[in-house]
Each structure stands twice: as C-alpha cells, then as structure tokens.
Image (cartoon, rainbow, N blue to C red):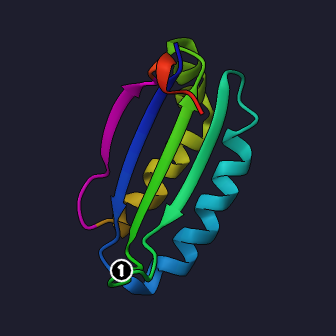
Amino acid sequence: MVLCILVSIALNSESSAEEVKSRLVEFAQSYRSDQGTLDWHVMQNPKIYVQDKTKFAIVERYTDGKAIKTHTANPLYAKFGKWIAPLVASPPVITVYTELESAKL
C-alpha cells in the first residue's frame, strides 16, 4: 500500500518565495534517497489564472508507514520545520492518503 502525503504551504511574504523554492528543491533531493521514499515532488502555484508565488505544495510518496517514520527521523526533517516556521502564514496543511490500486497510471 503506497502512502501519499500532500503538504500545502502558504508563505507570509512573496519576498521569501525564491529562497523557499530553492531550499525545497534541496530538501527534495535529500528526502528522495531515504529508504522507502518513492518520490518527493515540490510544486509552486503557476501563472495560469492568478499566480501566487507564496503557495507551494509537496507530494510525498512512501512504500509504507515505516518509510514515513524514516522520513521524520531524517535530521533534515527537524531543520526544515524550524527553518520554514517563521516564513509561513499559517502551519502547513498535511493530509495523508493511500493510493488506489485500480487507479495506477
């Protein structure tokens, strides 16, 4: 059973968007090497209707609950939380899902 975590982040200022974008890409590269992590995608709100550079989303995919524990034990996990806390307008919204077997691409 593949577990997916969707994290929605809203920054408190557009001035930190480029730094956040760069750091999220760095974090993704590290997290992808964690055992049991299938992928760690980072996205930013696009300019389709109205671009909002303060909005980011992360889609994390894990093989199982043990892999999520490995992820949260990664030293970068605590660093990420401390680093991003003063930059967000509100706490990130975190939602956990399971992938539906019949809906695989």
Name the residue rendered at 52%, 51% in the picture: 80
* Residue placed under numbered mark 1 in the picture: 52
Would you place residue 96 above or below residue 58 in this image?
above
Name the residue rendered at 53%, 20% in the picture: 2
Q: Position of residue 105 (x, y in %)?
A: 60, 33
Determine the image quadrant of residue 64.
Answer: top right
Name the residue rendered at 61%, 64% in the picture: 23
Determine the image quadrant of residue 40.
Answer: top right
Q: Position of residue 96 (x, y in %)?
A: 36, 30
Q: Position of residue 85 (x, y in %)?
A: 36, 58
Asked if the stretch drawn in magenta spans residue 90, the answer is yes
Which stretch is magenta?
89-99
Would you place residue 100 above or below residue 26 in this image?
above
Type of amino acid under label 1: Asp
Q: Nearer the viewer, residue 93 or 84?
A: 93
Would you place residue 101 above or below residue 51 in this image?
above
Left or right of 56: which side holds 75?
Answer: right
What number of labels is visible?
1
Q: Nearer the viewer, residue 13 or 86?
A: 13
Left or right of 82: which side holds 40?
Answer: right
Left or right of 61: which side holds 86?
Answer: left
Q: Does dot 1 land on a helix, a strand or a loop?
A: loop
Name the residue rendered at 65%, 60% in the picture: 25
Q: Nearer the viewer, residue 88 or 49?
A: 49
Circle 1 crowding by C-alpha within 10 Å: few under 14, some 14–19, many from 20 = some
Q: Residue furthest left?
A: 90
